[in-house]
Image: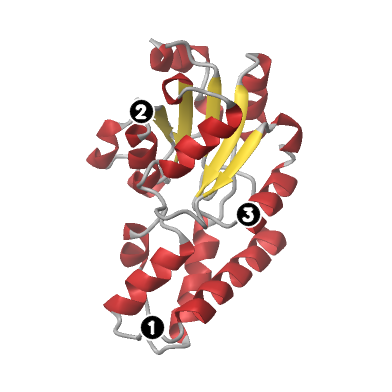
Amino acid sequence: MQLDTVIFDIDGLLIDSEPLWNEAATELFLEYGVSMTEEQYKTTTGLRTREFVQWWFQYFNIGDSELKRAEQKIVALVLSKIEQKGKVMPGVPYIFDFFHRKSFKIGLATSSPPALIDLVVNICGIEKYLHATASAEALAYGKPHPQVYLDCAGSLGSNPTSCICFEDSFNGMIAAKAARMKCVVVPHVSQLKDEKWSAADLKLSSLQNFGELHFNLVHS
């Protein structure tokens, strides 16, 4: 099917927020007397905040009574950190203009809450390009479940098989492929050589490296 829609993840792809989520998680868990390693954090990249907190609360035997408070606090910390020092990833203006010039419908699909979507859209200056956004926060399942991608495609009036997605996390890649969409992954440099990206249609080191040749490769 002819591609006519592009859907982007947000965290770690459009804005360098993963280190800030990590900072916020570290600060939060220190309140409960536990510390999380960098490797541990990476295993849950792409999950919703609620699932992330539940997973590690169970792992560290913290208990459930603080779950809601912890979820709210980590989101508030991340929003504050992004507002103060969030950096737009290389190639963001370029890639949105690239697909805009092709008259593609453009959307965002993220595990993060709507407040983060609004903040990042503002920081990146991409509101004029967007036709729809979707958050998995209130869904029954988040990534790697494909629902948030299917919801975004539905809002755009697009068939899932006409969509190309850009992701930076393993859970996001699985969600996009489960939705039967093409997927371009732009992993963190430390994970670039991992074999786990083999399910993607294309792997790049930066959004700014995506060009007509790559578009034709994915489109074929």
Q: How much space separates mark 3 and mark 1, taking CA atoms?
A: 24 Å
Is 46 on the left or on the right of 78, as rendered?
left
Dot 2 falls on a residue whose secondary structure is: loop
Answer with the quarter of the image where residue 205 lies: top left
Specify the amino acid type for callout 3.
Pro
- Can the viewer see residue 95 in this picture? no
Query: Which of the two discs, 1 and 2, labels the residue nearer the N terminus?
Result: 1
Where is mark 3, residue-wise? 114
Point out the image quarter for the N terminus.
top left
Disc marking residue 180: 2
The location of residue 68, given as percent across then percent down, is 50, 77
Disc marking residue 64: 1
Q: How much space separates mark 1 and mark 2, taking CA atoms?
A: 36 Å
Comparing 114 with 121, the one in front is: 114
Disc marking residue 88: none
Specify the amino acid type for callout 1.
Asp
Q: Residues within 10 Å of mark 3 (few under 14, many from 20)?
A: some
Query: Which of the two discs, 3 and 2, labels the residue nearer the N terminus?
Result: 3
Is 215 on the left or on the right of 123, as rendered?
left
Comparing 209 with 62, the one in front is: 62
Is 139 on the left or on the right of 58, as rendered?
right
The location of residue 51, given as percent across then percent down, is 40, 65
Specify the amino acid type for callout 2.
Arg
